[in-house]
Image: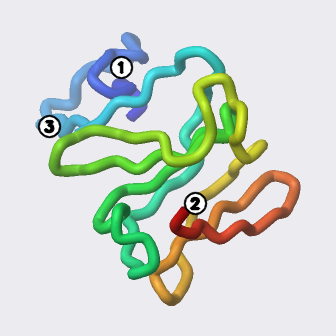
Amino acid sequence: WSRWEGDEVRNTGLEPTGTVDTFAIHQYRHEGILCAVSGGVVYRGDAIPALDTAFVYADFCEGSVWALDVVRREATRIIGGEDGAGGIPAITAVRRGPDGELFVLTYEGQVLRLVDA
């Protein structure tokens, strides 16, 4: 950053520094109403076994929450739909509590705990 976004050159005005670039294992495309990743953290809790070691992040505009399997490099939407239906409006962060469980924070000041369905 700021020459690259994912594996695409975004700032052509910056010359390579001669260092080796390390690229992300997953890219997040701005498609539909997806606009910005809101934080993210590796799950370390016990209450949701399906998320074991997943990197959990959210999208601010769509209100969706995603779990990235870092081994398979695949992301799965776990909250919200592609059109924003069922999502959580204006997610600003995903954070881990002292017990390893996850919380979603919103622009409006909500603090929501993720639970197994």
Mark 1 Cα within 10 Å, few/some/many (few <14, many 20+)? few
Query: Which residue is nearer to you in this view: 53 or 81?
Result: 81
The percent position of residue 6, horizontal first and vertical second, equals 33, 28
Mark 2, residue position? 94
Among the 4 quarters of the image, the one containing residue 15: top left
| Amino acid under disc 2 | Val
The percent position of residue 28, horizontal first and vertical second, equals 42, 29
User: Could you tell me if the residues under marks 1 and 2 are in contact, i.e. CB atoms within 8 Å?
Assistant: no
Mark 1, residue position? 14
| Residue depicted at x 13% and y 31% | 18
Quarter of the figure that contains the C terminus: bottom right
User: Could you tell me if the residues under marks 2 and 3 are in contact, i.e. CB atoms within 8 Å?
Assistant: no
Q: CA distance from mark 1 to mark 3?
A: 13 Å
Mark 3, residue position? 19
| Residue depicted at x 54% and y 16% | 31
| Residue depicted at x 35% and y 70% | 49
Q: CA distance from mark 1 to mark 2?
A: 32 Å
Label 1 secondary element: loop
Tell which circle, 1 or 2, labels the residue nearer the N-terminal end. Answer: 1
| Amino acid under disc 1 | Leu
